[in-house]
Amino acid sequence: MVKIPDIKAFEKLRKKLEGEKDLNRKSICVCGGSACIATGSLGLIDLFEKELKKHGIDDEVDILVTGCHGFCEKGPLVVIRPEGIFYPLVKKENVPDIVTESVIEGKAIEALLYTDPMTDKKIVYEHDVPFYKKQKRLVLGNNGLIDPMVITDYIRVGGYKAFASVVDSMTPDKVIEMVIDSGLKGRGGGGFPTGVKWKLCKNAKGKTKNIVCNADEGDPGAYMDRSILEGNPHSVIEGMLIGGFAITASTGYIYVRTEYPLAIHRLKQAIKQAKGLGFIGKNILGTKFSFDIEIREGSGAFVCGEETSLMHSIEGLSPEPSQRPPFPTESGLWGNPTNINNVETWAVIPLIVNKGSKYFSSIGTENSKGTKIFSLVGKINNSGLVEVPMGISMGEIINGIGGGIPDGKAFKAVQTGGPSGGCIPAALMDIPVDYEKLAEVGSIMGSGGMVVMDEDTCVVDIAKYFLSFTNDESCGKCTSCRDGSKMMLNILTRISEGHGKPEDIDLLLELGEAIKDASQCGLGQTLPNPVLSTIRYFREEYNAHIVDKRCPAHVCKELVNYSIDPEACIGCGVCLKNCSVGAITGKIKEAHLIDPDKCTKCGVCREVCKFNAVIVE
């Protein structure tokens, strides 16, 4: 790979690559994100290659291994371009027919098409799938179009054009002004104006300045950053180069959790290729700007998502938060001014430069600009990554994009913002999703996690789950966070086991507010949100656990009883055979019985019974 000597040489290469782009050339796009790989997408590659050779068209058709397409639960995903024929859940035995009918003849195979769960209709084209139709995929837009391991693919779709224009014709102050005008807020959870943070860091005293990409994505069910790094790592690198130029920094660090091996592998390859072409290093593109990027792998401590803890980890110190001020923009890594943004924030910067701040600020709401990526998981028909304009209603995400709740169940709530977020009830589904409104209803934007719950979800159990997580992940430095979270968890456990007291609810509220006020970092300050929000919207369910000693959702084992309806049971024996503890007795063709003393309340008998004879009370 030959180093690009200057801006003119880059422009020549870019135009050449863009000119080679054949929009009508046949290609088989196979999703190479972690979720699709886990379901066997890479095993399809060799089969497609063999089929193309078999038909003598291997020189006429490209096989492209892309990043995550977003519709993760339907993997492996395959898209036939240029038509855009969309095939979910592709199996190895489907490959010959796809090549024969879709690649060669350009026809869709109806039996393999996606079926919309809301209308029961078959959908042919990717852009018509409801999951994608209501999204605005800006940051994720190229994920399904390029090979993340090939830098020329990124350049071909406009990659590094923004950075070249910045170092060629803009000043650092002009770049910062553009980011401020765009209205971009940090996508890592805090929501602080990105351009303002950059300005503070640039103007801070100190010759050596650093920038950091926070890729320590630790929220349960969240994988937005991972998918960007896997699918389009060069967008993050380009964003950091622009940020480094604007802040006058010379070094950038990408702090990524070691549990993301594919992201790390592709990121290392991208950095190597960027160095090879001269986008990273000394006197980049023949200018005076020099910049280097290093990867730091974190060992998975949730607290390292907090910026001062993250910096301590990079420095080789114990990852504990520091009192602020001073803020990192004044004194960060090794005492130098340091700017920290998350993966999504860096990845959107090239778009703002290329499209302009007015374009970006025209999307979203008055105070929350642009798009936001969410991981939509839980009790939802269409789980995966979604990128939507700020201000879209929660209902549009849950029903329009997510396809509603499976099995005809009722929607109960959605938890946003990770383990420190709040639960928003079905009654508030018309609220716009932005920083201000989510905070108003007792939740947070966070990094973008959304966990959907149906009628079978117990809010006490959910609150207990998240408190258990944050209790385990507390660094232990603050008494309020360390001991307060343990006290709240003990109370929730007592309530779920049927030993709750009426005064427990007020005690939880009091503890929650005290922990928020006294904790040093964002983890402790938001830790009580799952408890406070569920009490706020589902207090009657807490009362049912405490006063009536029952769990309305039939989740808390100590508060439910299993029995068999003698009128409905036909004595088939299926439940008896599947009971691992021998709690069920009965003869064939006679009603069976459950011994409550032996029953572990695992629920298997209810799952296997085809006659709804198992009663849970």
Image (tube, rainbow, N blue to C red):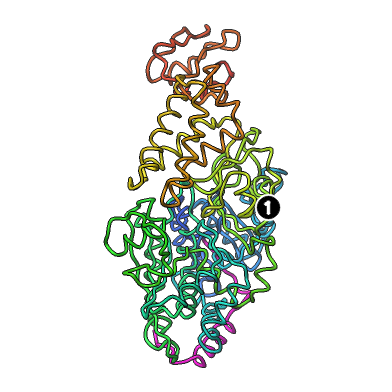
**As drawn, is 534 to the left or to the right of 105?**
left
The magenta stretch spans residue 23:
yes
The answer to which of 614 and 365 lies nearer the viewer is: 365
The magenta stretch spans residue 51:
no
Task: Give the residue displayed 51% in from the left and 71% down from the top.
Answer: 58
Please state, as top left, top right, bottom left or bottom right, where the N terminus lies in the image. Answer: bottom left
Task: Give the residue displayed 45% in from the left and 58% down from the top.
Answer: 226
The answer to which of 462 and 586 lies nearer the viewer is: 462
Residue 617 shows up from this direction: no
**As drawn, is 87 to the left or to the right of 7?**
right
**As drawn, is 613 to the left or to the right of 499?**
right
- Name the secondary structure under disc 1: helix
Q: Position of residue 369 (x, y in %)?
A: 64, 63
**As drawn, is 536 to the left or to the right of 482?**
right
The answer to which of 435 and 101 lies nearer the viewer is: 435
Decide: is 206 above or below 131: below
Please name the amino acid that badge 1 sits on.
Pro
First to last magenta residue range: 1-30
Q: Position of residue 477 (x, y in %)?
A: 33, 48
Q: Position of residue 400 (x, y in %)?
A: 69, 48
List the residue tagged with mark 1: 130
Residue 469 shows up from this direction: yes
Q: Position of residue 117 (x, y in %)?
A: 67, 43
The answer to which of 141 and 530 lies nearer the viewer is: 530
Decide: is 483 above or below 126: above
Decide: is 458 above or below 89: above
Please state, as top left, top right, bottom left or bottom right, where the C terminus lies in the image. Answer: top right
Q: What is the crowding at mark 1: few (fewer than 14 residues within 10 Å), some, or many (at least 20)?
A: some
